[in-house]
Amino acid sequence: ESARHAASCATQLITSAQNATQHNTNKYSQETLTTECKTLGEAIPRLVDAAQAAAARPGRAADQLDLISASEQFLQPSGHAVSAARAALPTVSEASAAQHLADTTHRFGAAAADLRSAVSRARISCKGLEMDAAADIIRSLQDELRELEEAAAALQLRPLPGQTAEWAWTSLRSGGRAAAAATAALASGARLREAAACGRGAGDLAAALRDFAAGLRAHLALHRPPPHKDRVITSSHQVLASSLTLVETVKHYLTTSEQVDTTTISSIAKDISQV
């Protein structure tokens, strides 16, 4: 509920910021507000989707953890958007536009604080489930990739609304970098046998791979035929397989007294980082 309310308040803030554009006498403050609201807006769809999935399947750990991840991703630009809105308020000359911006800024700030608190509580209640949930997500991505491969071969893919070549490339690049960072964190946690660090790293890895998969789908849908299609798909299969192996291997070490084989962990992590 906190997630959906925060998403709704964010949408209202973005709308009021757009309405204030023509009344803002300071070009710099308006440009900053517009930029921050754009970044915030890009995080809304995933948050809404994750909230809907978690509500539909309340007993599935993967959905609950995905909602936590989506919420944290959404909260990252939230503070910047609120700060930009507050900074722009004194230079909005039209009274009703300024009041609307002030009201929506206040409501969104409160909603973001509530969501941040809810995420902290959820992290505690979901402790220990991260590894299983991450493995479930990666397996579902493997299934999706096989279906994607078949659809691409049959030329049945169509880009989703708003997906452009630039969006696809950005998603692939950012997802790949995030996966590499999460892999490093997971491997480091495994070497130290830190369950909390491993859980967070596994969850972040699954989330990054989901973003990467979305970019891959858009890339394949936007290019007929996609350049290097077979190589890209084969590489993606390998990355998902290595990711699942890493998560399951780390879980094994965390749940047994067996000594961590750092060489094996590093080798698997290297395969993922080359995405």
Image: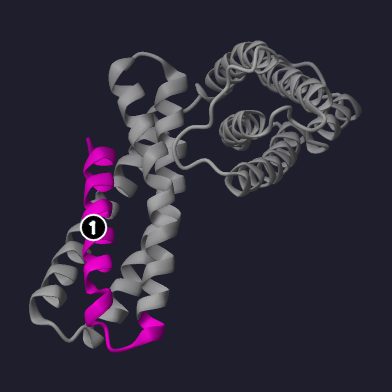
Q: Is residue 243 left or right of residue 22?
A: right
Q: Quadrant of residue 36?
A: bottom left
Q: Which residue type does callout 1 highlight?
A: Phe
Quadrant (top left, top right, bottom left, bottom right) of the N terminus: top left
Residue drawn at x 59%, y 15% is 144
Q: Which residues are magenta?
A: 1-29
Coloring applied to the structure: one colour
Q: Residue furthest toward the left? A: 96
The prevailing secondary structure element of the residues shown in magenta is helix
Total numbered circles: 1
- Give the x, y percent position of residue 216: 65, 31
Q: Is residue 5 magenta?
A: yes
Q: Nearer the viewer, residue 224 or 1?
A: 224
- Give the x, y percent position of residue 245: 75, 17
Asked if residue 270 is positioned above or below residue 140 in the image, the reply reads below
Residue tagged by mark 1?
108
- Give the x, y percent position of residue 234: 80, 20
Asked if residue 271 is positioned above or below residue 95 in the image, the reply reads above
